[in-house]
Image (tube, rainbow, N blue to C red):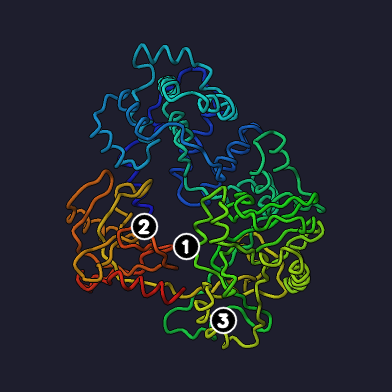
């Protein structure tokens, strides 16, 4: 969103910190604990751009105690927080303290777009009642408590209480704490700690704050997130780098991520490949698999771990891979795929989804949706780190390893991703077009002399790892539902629901939601269209009169009982507005059925 739009949003209401009373006239100049974390969240909210947010983080990390710095990094790096109270209970409690009726609270919530911030803004001023004054006196130490104490003692104890005790305690905290600290507390209570900071930004801030190489911090951060927050874990994270430092073989390393190769309409693909990547003989091509990116790790004791790209340990969900035949000291990069052993090809991603959300897998599901690990890179072998070696060397060792392991009982669940040398860029467009027939998403292009990188960092101007995906599938769909966005988009309708006509062309059937793909100007245009065509309201959702057609792109189609159309799509996004097309000419559900049949 534009800077003017961001400024406009914050001009509508003050931040929770504005006008907040300080409980003591002797407050220190440098805040600490929950107060420091609260100030950080507010600074991050108003900071314009990644650089400004990184600078706020650097300043915060340098002033924190080790315990609080450890928790700050965990919370901003994706620590999953469980909501302690239902949204309805939080709203009712906030309304009771503020004295607002439900309709007024909902109007405020829609304007602000964030429940934690809305509640903090609507809480009465500090000490404005005898009850509040008593709470301030009873909980005087809370305002000075460390963030570590809040996470390990106060909030931890709240998790063990029943709902009534939680609510009573939370209301007392709201009355006792300054408004800015209530904002941070609400974020921790609601589990909604999304403040526009990515793991990469946190890593960059740590590297700058403690003068450490970025790639070392990224590797350490993955291991830091796998253990409890503690001063010892913090010291291991920020200690000076040693030349002999190696990533311990007890978890994943940062995944090497690809850049996207895009050919503009009318451009010659082979020519663009030559200009962008150079000599074709320096590269190999490989299918881009449509599964779950994962690292398979076998530690020195032979213990198997399977880590998703989201750094979630998913070993128990894929019992096919449990075997005593894995060699110790191994780390592989690859893809978990639902597999059709009869046709020897991947099954649709929709089949794999049946396995993703289950922590335990039934025997029936194991039979119905078997999974394989498609290995495509070797990161460690016999306890030795191979990431710094050229791809050609890693690949030769990987081929020998997989060939051997396929002679063991692991054979049916272990595959080696095929690679093809590139002799001429002109051969690739036809190869890419064949991807869908092989159940893949396109091509990966890998440079033979490249080390295994970290994230999307390029070691050379030409890059080392590219993905050239197939053009998305698409249909012309009708906008039928809308909902306001959150955060900086809270004042605009930016989340949309789409439908297609039934086969008879008499009824619109919902099948997808999307919120990306439009420019700021187009968002404002669609917002005005929605406001003038609202017909019904279902909580925050608005049903609109069908007047707008969009071209909706997506990566795949699957059957779904959740949608009236009977279908769902993967990664939907808006490709363009079709203001030139009447609603009556939008596509029918049969278009999805045909795409599904063509690609299965």
Instruction: For marks 1 and 3, give the CA distance.
Output: 32 Å
Q: Earlier in the sequence, mark 1 or mark 3?
A: 3
> Residue 474: percent from the left, percent from the top?
37, 72
User: In what element is the residue under mark 2?
Assistant: loop
Q: Which mark is residue 273?
A: 3
> Residue 51: percent from the left, percent from the top?
53, 51
Q: State left or right for residue 389 relative to residue 541.
A: right
> Residue 155: percent from the left, percent from the top?
52, 27
Instruction: Say which residue appears at 32% left-offset and 54% top-offset.
Output: 494
Name the foreground residue: 357 vs 550.
357
Whether residue 31 appears in this view of the structure is: no
Mark 3 nearby-residue class (10 Å; few <14, some 14–19, many ≥20): some
Q: Quadrant of residue 401?
A: bottom right
> Residue 450: percent from the left, percent from the top?
70, 70
Q: Earlier in the sequence, mark 1 or mark 2?
A: 1
Instruction: Say which residue appears at 34% left-offset and 27% top-offset.
Output: 94
> Is 154 located above or below residue 574 in the figure?
above
Q: Which mark is residue 49?
A: none
Instruction: For marks 2 and 3, give the CA distance.
Output: 42 Å
Q: State left or right for residue 599 relative to residue 458.
A: left
Name the foreground residue: 534 vs 465.
534
The label nearer to you, 1 versus 2, is 2
Whether residue 314 appears in this view of the structure is: yes
Is disc 1 in contact with disc 2, using a CB cutoff of under 8 Å?
Answer: no
> Is 20 located above or below residue 302 in the figure?
above
The label nearer to you, 2 versus 3, is 2
Instruction: Say which residue appears at 60% left-offset and 47% top-offset.
Output: 205
Name the foreground residue: 482 vs 361.
361
Which residue position holds label 2?
Answer: 561
Q: Which mark is residue 350?
A: 1
Quadrant of the image containing the N terminus: bottom left
User: In what element is the residue under mark 3?
Assistant: helix
């Amino acid at each position: 969103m534009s800077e003017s739009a961001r400024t406009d949003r914050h001009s509508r209401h003050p931040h929770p910190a504005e006008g907040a009373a300080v409980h003591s006239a002797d407050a220190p100049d440098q805040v600490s604990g929950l107060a420091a974390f609260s100030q950080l969240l507010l600074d991050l909210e108003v900071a314009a751009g990644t650089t400004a947010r990184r600078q706020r983080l650097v300043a915060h990390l340098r002033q924190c105690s080790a315990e609080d710095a450890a928790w700050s990094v965990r919370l901003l790096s994706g620590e999953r927080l469980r909501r302690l109270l239902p949204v309805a209970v939080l709203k009712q409690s906030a309304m009771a303290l503020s004295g607002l009726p439900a309709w007024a609270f909902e109007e405020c919530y829609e304007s602000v777009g964030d429940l934690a911030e809305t509640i903090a803004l609507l809480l009465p001023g500090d000490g404005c009642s005898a009850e509040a004054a008593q709470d301030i006196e009873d909980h005087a130490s809370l305002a000075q408590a460390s963030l570590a104490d809040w996470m390990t003692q106060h909030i931890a104890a709240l998790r063990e209480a029943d709902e009534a005790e939680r609510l009573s305690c939370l209301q007392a905290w709201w009355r006792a704490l300054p408004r800015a600290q209530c904002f941070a507390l609400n974020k921790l209570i609601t589990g909604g700690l999304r403040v526009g900071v990515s793991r990469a930004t946190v890593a960059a801030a740590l590297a700058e704050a403690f003068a450490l190489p970025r790639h070392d911090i990224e590797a350490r951060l993955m291991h830091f997130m796998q253990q409890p927050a503690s001063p010892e874990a913090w010291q291991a994270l920020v200690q000076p780098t040693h030349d002999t430092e190696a990533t311990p073989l007890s978890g994943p390393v940062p995944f090497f991520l690809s850049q996207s190769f895009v050919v503009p309409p009318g451009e010659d693909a082979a020519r663009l490949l030559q200009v962008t990547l150079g000599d074709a003989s320096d590269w190999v091509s490989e299918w881009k698999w449509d599964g779950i990116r994962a690292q398979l790790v076998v530690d020195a004791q032979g213990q198997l771990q399977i880590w998703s790209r989201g750094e979630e340990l998913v070993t128990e969900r894929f019992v096919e891979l449990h075997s005593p035949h894995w060699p110790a000291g191994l780390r592989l990069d690859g893809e978990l795929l639902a597999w059709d052993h009869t046709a020897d090809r991947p099954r649709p991603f929709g089949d794999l989804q049946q396995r993703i959300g289950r922590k335990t897998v039934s025997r029936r599901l194991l039979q119905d949706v078997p999974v394989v690990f498609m290995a495509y890179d070797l990161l460690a072998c016999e306890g030795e780190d191979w990431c710094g070696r050229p791809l050609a060397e890693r690949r030769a060792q990987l081929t020998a390893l997989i060939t051997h392991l396929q002679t063991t009982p692991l054979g049916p669940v272990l595959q080696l991703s095929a690679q093809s040398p590139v002799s001429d860029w002109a051969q690739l467009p036809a190869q890419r077009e064949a991807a869908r027939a092989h159940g893949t998403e396109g091509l990966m292009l890998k440079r033979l002399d490249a080390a295994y990188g970290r994230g999307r960092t390029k070691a050379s101007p030409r890059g080392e790892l590219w993905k050239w995906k197939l053009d998305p599938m698409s249909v012309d769909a009708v906008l039928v539902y809308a909902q306001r966005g959150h955060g900086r988009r809270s004042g605009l309708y930016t989340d949309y629901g789409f439908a297609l006509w039934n086969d008879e062309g008499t009824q619109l059937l919902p099948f997808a939601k999307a919120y990306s793909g439009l420019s700021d100007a187009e968002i404002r245009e669609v917002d005005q269209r929605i406001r003038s065509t609202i017909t019904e309201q279902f909580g925050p959702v608005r049903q609109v009169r069908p007047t707008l057609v969009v071209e909706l792109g997506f990566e795949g189609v699957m059957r779904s009982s959740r949608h009236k159309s009977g279908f769902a799509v993967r990664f939907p996004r808006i490709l363009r507005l079709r203001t030139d097309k009447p609603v009556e000419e939008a596509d029918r559900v049969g278009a999805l059925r045909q795409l599904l049949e063509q690609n299965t």
